[in-house]
Amino acid sequence: MKIGILSVAHPHAQSYAQAVVDNPDATFTGIYDADAKRGQETAARFGTEYFASPDDLLAGGLDGVIVASENVHHRRHVEAAAGAGVRAILCEKPLATTVADAQAMINACAAANVRLATAFPCRYSPAFRRLLEQVRGGAIGEVLAIRGTNRGKCPFHWFVDKALSGGGAVIDHAVHVADLNRLLLGREATSVYAEIGSGFHGQEWDDTGFLSINYGDEVFATLDTSWSRPKTYPTWGDVTLQVVGTGGVLDADLFAQNITHYDDAAGTVTNSHWGSGTDAALVADFLRLAGGETAPNIATGEDGLHALAVALAAYHSAKAGQPVAVPMD
């Protein structure tokens, strides 16, 4: 099957590209990127072709397209790919920067009979799969609450340009755990109360967020979704979940499998992840969609929309100083 990548603006595009190259059933047709130098360098790195425009890449009869552009460009790239007749599209999270854009993307793909997936690789963490199995199997009884974190280093670049990203740490990180919570609870978020700030870097974009998410029937979750890890932190960040039930508690650290390197010569401490590659597992499922198969674990466009709505409600809540209903316009 023929696969293309529309933009490599997001760092995850590198691991997605590697996963495509490593799959014997996939042909990596090429890359488009608005930054020609970046696009050409990435294409050369993975032994594929650089295309100067999205239309040129999409004219190649692709089976699947991965969209890894700046958040604000997701809609036009997804709609262009859907219009080109591809079989499946994997869009980087957050799905869009507004609910209206996300819904338009879903509608465009449905009208073209294209399968739209949202890039939520945390679903593929072995720790999360086991956690989900335990929760659904009743290991801790009825779930009452979830405490989650998704804390990382600030990625800077376009991520801190609201015109391109749609926000800051909250829109970047909250969507991951919002998606995991929805799977664990089997419920939709009904309201969000959030405190959001910029205390770590002191800029106009948010780098700190703490959310309290209501799921109805007195079931709730809290989430620390911040760019709070310092530059010297040994790894990019974390995703942790503590699930509290009537019969027990389950703790999961999705990225705990690390080798820590203390380097006296360089004066650094770094962690190298040796666990299962969640990005590779995500792309493998996407390639099944592009090949006309089923992939029940992959997040759909609708899943991406629900997670986005939680993040956007958090911004509205912080501005209003009170809980805000989800879904929202």
Image (tube, rainbow, N blue to C red):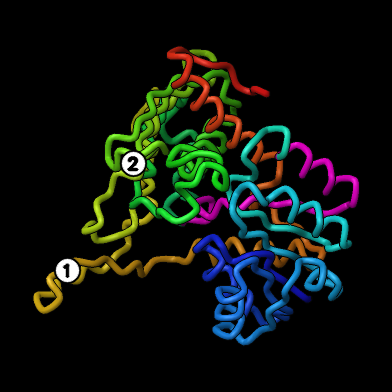
Q: Image height check: is 31 above or below 94? A: below
Residue 141: image tag: none
For marks 1 and 2, give the CA distance.
29 Å
Query: Magenta segment, which residues?
Result: 102-125
Q: Is residue 172 left or right of residue 66?
A: left
- Tell me what residue is drawn at x 56 percent, y 30 percent: 312
- Tell me what residue is drawn at x 51 percent, y 36 percent: 178
Q: Secondary structure at mark 1?
A: strand
Q: Closer to the camera, 228 or 131?
A: 228
Whether residue 250 is visible here, answered yes or no, is: no
- Give the percent coordinates (x, y) of residue 127: 42, 52
> Which residue occupies the extreme left position in the image?
264
Residue 251: image tag: 2
Of callouts 1 and 2, the N-terminal one: 2
- Give the percent coordinates (x, y) of residue 249: 34, 33
Q: Which amino acid does the dot numbered 1 rest on?
A: Thr
Q: Residue 61 is drawn in which quadrant?
A: bottom right
Taking the magenta stretch, the answer to whether it contains residue 170 is no
Q: Is residue 50 left or right of residue 125?
A: right
Taking the magenta stretch, the answer to whether it contains residue 124 is yes
Q: Closer to the camera, 75 or 216?
A: 75
Which residue is tagged 1?
Answer: 268
- Tell me what residue is drawn at x 43 percent, y 14 percent: 321
Q: Image height check: is 145 above or below 1? A: above
Q: Closer to the camera, 96 or 138?
A: 96
Crowding at dot 1, Cα within 10 Å, few <14 / some 14-19 / many 20+, comes out as few
Q: Is residue 229 left or right of residue 318?
A: left
